[in-house]
Image (cartoon, rainbow, N blue to C red):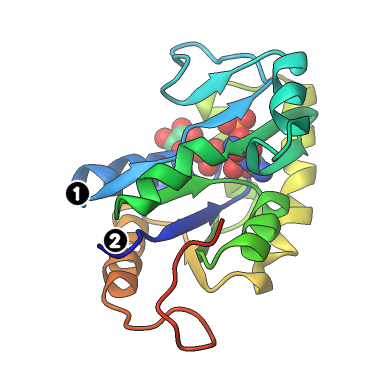
Amino acid sequence: MSNGLLIVLSAPSGCGKTTIVRQVMRELPGLEFSVSHTTRQPRPGEVDGVQYHFVTEPEFITLRDQTPCGFLEWAEVHGNWYGTSVAEVETRCRAGKDVLLDIDVQGAAQVRLRANPVTVFIVPPSLAVLEQRLRGRGTENEGTLAKRLNNARMEIAAIDAYQYLIINDRLDEAVESLRSIIIAERSRQRRDRGGVPMRWQS
Ligand code: ADP
Ligand code: 5GP
């Protein structure tokens, strides 16, 4: 059995990534979502182990500093720690599942060094629309909203490092784009530059 794909998705917070991923996962079999660890507080309705593994800072640091490192990648985002545990992706990838990673641009750069991911960046039609969506979601106060909008500018500057770009204007079109990318990548014969069909490297 060949290893599954690692699909890295990045987007400024509030752009619609979670909404798109939820819909694509409903429509496309064989996709698994990598549940990250975070020190951020759960939002109303978020369940431990579903959206995130919610951990304390000491718990996060223990996993980060163990040998070998318990994380495939980790980063500080908007003042909280986030990381993808090796356990979360390795077994599934090796079992041939395609795993979706919803991670920021710093994490994506680390995954590129260790594996051969498919990388997708999702942007809003404009920063004004992004602000509307973040406000509409109702999860941020003025402080965290400003931090996320500021970060969006920095994240958008990293677009060139990604293989695919999706503009989330109309939701149905953005969902169709991501679905199509994954279907096309599943049909690719060779992913690495050396010609060896290798999708995961620990
Ligand atoms: P992210 O996961 O990127 O932080 P969310 O998926 O939580 O973003 O989306 C932020 C808000 O924008 C939500 O309220 C969602 O319903 C809304 N939204 C997402 N995509 C669209 C779209 N294409 N058009 C209008 N609203 C959208
Ligand atoms: P949120 O707090 O809105 O759920 O996520 C904030 C940001 O953290 C988003 O850009 C999201 O992609 C990123 N993020 C979520 N999980 C991880 C992770 O495991 N690693 C990294 N590097 N970023 C993550």
Mark 2 Cα-neighbour bin, 10 Å: few <14, some 14–19, many ≥20: some
In terms of image quadrants, where is residue 148?
top right
Q: In the rendered image, is residue 177 in sight?
A: yes
Front-most of residues 73 and 47: 73
Residue pointed to by mark 1: 27
**Residue lying at 75% horizontally and 64% vertically, measured from the top left:** 157
Q: Where is residue 144? Give x, y as percent.
A: 75, 26
Whereabouts is ligand 2, in terms of quadrant? Answer: top right
**Residue lying at 69% horizontally and 27% vertically, measured from the top left:** 63
Front-most of residues 94 and 19: 94
Q: In the rendered image, is residue 131 in sight?
A: no
In terms of image quadrants, where is residue 183?
bottom left
Q: Where is residue 86? Give x, y as percent.
A: 55, 41
Q: Quadrant of the N terminus?
A: bottom left
> Circle 2 sits in a helix, a strand or a loop, which is it?
helix
**Marks 1 and 2, Cα distance to the nearest angstrom?**
8 Å
Residue pointed to by mark 2: 179
Q: Where is residue 179? Give x, y as percent.
A: 29, 61
Residue 101 sits above or below residue 84 on the image? below
On screen, residue 175 versus residue 120, left or right, reads left
Asked if labels 2 and 1 touch by Cβ distance under 8 angstroms, the answer is: yes
